[in-house]
Amino acid sequence: MKNSELKSIADFCKVNWQEYCDFTIKAADRVCENRFLFNAPWDLERTETEVSFGEKIDWSYKLNGDKEFMFQLNRHGFLIQLWQAYHLTYDEKYLKSFVRIVEDWVDTVSCEDMGKEPWNIIEGPWRALETGIRSVNWIRAVRYIEETDYYTETLKNKIEKSLRFHAKLLQKTHTAFQMGGNWGIIQDGGLFQIASYFKDTALLETATERLNQETDLQIMSDGVLWEQSSGYHNAVLTVLLDVIITAQKEHIALSDNFKNKVLKMAEVNLCWIKPNGHHPLFGDSDDNDIRDIMCKCALVFDNGAFKSQGFKVLDYDSVWFFGLQGVERYNKLPVCAPAFSTCYLTDSGNYILRNSWSESSNWLCLHNGYTGGGHAHADKLHFDLMLKGREVLVDAGRYTYLNNAQRRYIKSPKAHNVCLIDNKHYLKMTSQWETKNPALAVQYPCFDNEYCTLIGGAHLGYLKSKGAFIERKILHIKPDIYIIIDAFKAKFFHTYQQYFHFAPTGKVNICGKKAEFDDDTVKAELHFLTPNAKVTKEKSLYSSNYNAVCENDCVKSSFSAVGGNCAITVIYGNHKEAFEPFDISLVTAKAARSEKILPYKKAFGIVIKAQEKEYTVNLAFKELKQLFECNGKTASGCITVFCGKKMIFNKW
């Protein structure tokens, strides 16, 4: 890219993205002094503690015994920050540091030493994942400094010799492990960029064939990465978008099937993006803002719906990537609101409910699908909830990859908004990556009309150990009432538990069988209607990103029963200044013809008295083969909702 355009790009960023410019310069200043803090939004494993190496960088350094620092260090994302800082300031210290660090790495972590301790292919700087990521960062960096005096023939030769060895290693490292996980796509995305850089048609063919195979194997029919981690879904999507962009620039043919797979992944982001612009925090993920990815998707696919969920102007990273021509294209692209609000990603088991596309909308995501790989968590039937654009019920995040108690807890069912039987996990964590006997998910059909939406599912995690299973249905009475219907199908005596983990931004109080959440912006209440339930509050863990952790409140509802039973939780909320409590009660059900009172295990009703409306929900847990009545409302089927006297929803 020409220096004249780079100056114009820098000027654009200073006007539109000053905060990002300041962040970049601050990070680059640290790197110039051999100080490293990985706190950029898309650093795969962030750090909270700065590491200072003094005169010499130790490329095998492990922070607190965690190899992830070494891996992040050897991905060389900081090279991007160095060349951006140079074009923002024209201070040559950034280019001098760029040259010094690259030469030190090439000379210290030599190709000849690869395979010897500590530079082994499994754990060291030449690990294949880092090799693929580093390749992309080097090639991208070269294109932005090649017109400067610091990009000498000597430096060019060193980089290109090393890149060829990167390619050799990536070609060799291709097993079923790579084919079946994010490593393969990320590695071969790097191989593709090397092949394009050298215009190596044979290498390009290898990379393209692998990427075609890996996307076929890893991307579900609804577009979700099979590993069931929103963070790795977007890490892979970013790599694949870059492949398409390079192919467009270099006139490299890609199959329609491949491009459609990437498009489906982008559409997943459109489905599950939260009102605050972040992706759901499930599996091994950080709480990342994905509006920059949506900007890139908008340009790659010329799609105004993607732009509607991106930034108003092209994001900081994409400006450097696409140049001023990209800025112009983005500005001309008309915004198009998505044609849907509720979304069912049935192959992966992700169901998203929202009442609008505004930043203050309500949003719920239920997860109940294939367990996934090592980055997936034991989160069958977990759901997240935002009210008026604010986090209320949350996932625990990931925190660490070390094999310790925190890692095993955060991956466990108890760290999620799920139900347990006898307070026992339904699958066993055997390490920080492995689980034993994953539970089969059962997905229910979804029902929707203008008044209500019903989603749900079950899992068979307790079928072998306890001869039981759990099902969860979520009834959304639009726009802001959520009824959680948890049914336990079992024999004999059991205790049952429901866990609800709250955002650390708010305070939680227990008032009898009601939990109150207040973050000074939004107030919400959870009413636990199960007759003999005991509601308590305890502490849990929440991690917004790797290496960051804090305590948050968890509310547990516990009860016991002989045989099966059900638990009902009603959730609603509003802006704090507009919040008014609802009157919520459980009422008995009776057969319409005989007027015989039906037992709780068969049927009952819920009455919700809101400000200006009264809702009656008739629930049947067995086929009654007759009409039944609750609160004077006669119903049929399994779930019937009345607003006043009007039936607004009926599900058999």
Image (tube, rainbow, N blue to C red):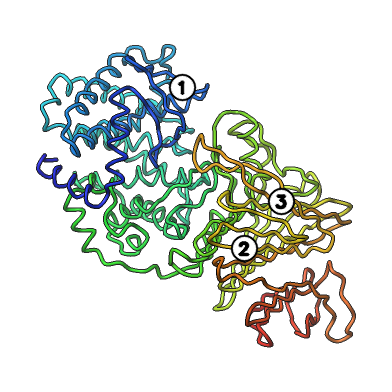
Instruction: Give the residue at mark 1.
Output: 122
Element type at mark 1: loop
Alpha-carbon distance for marks 2 and 1?
Answer: 48 Å
Instruction: Give the residue at mark 3.
Output: 460
Label 1 crowd (10 A; few <14 / some 14-19 / many >=20) = few
Residue 202 visible to an observer of this rendering:
no
Instruction: Give the residue at mark 2.
Output: 524
Label 3 crowd (10 A; few <14 / some 14-19 / many >=20) = some
Q: Is residue 625 left or right of residue 246?
A: right
Alpha-carbon distance for marks 3 and 1?
Answer: 36 Å
Ranked by sequence position, the earlier of labels 2 and 1 is 1
The one of 570 and 68 positioned closer to us in this rendering: 570
Vertical comparison of 578 with 515: above or below: below
Which disc is residue 143 wearing? none
Residues at marks 2 and 1 touching, judged by CB atoms closer than 8 Å = no
Q: Which residue is located at x 37 percent, y 44 percent?
A: 212
Ranked by sequence position, the earlier of labels 3 and 1 is 1
Q: Quadrant of the C terminus?
A: bottom right
Element type at mark 3: loop
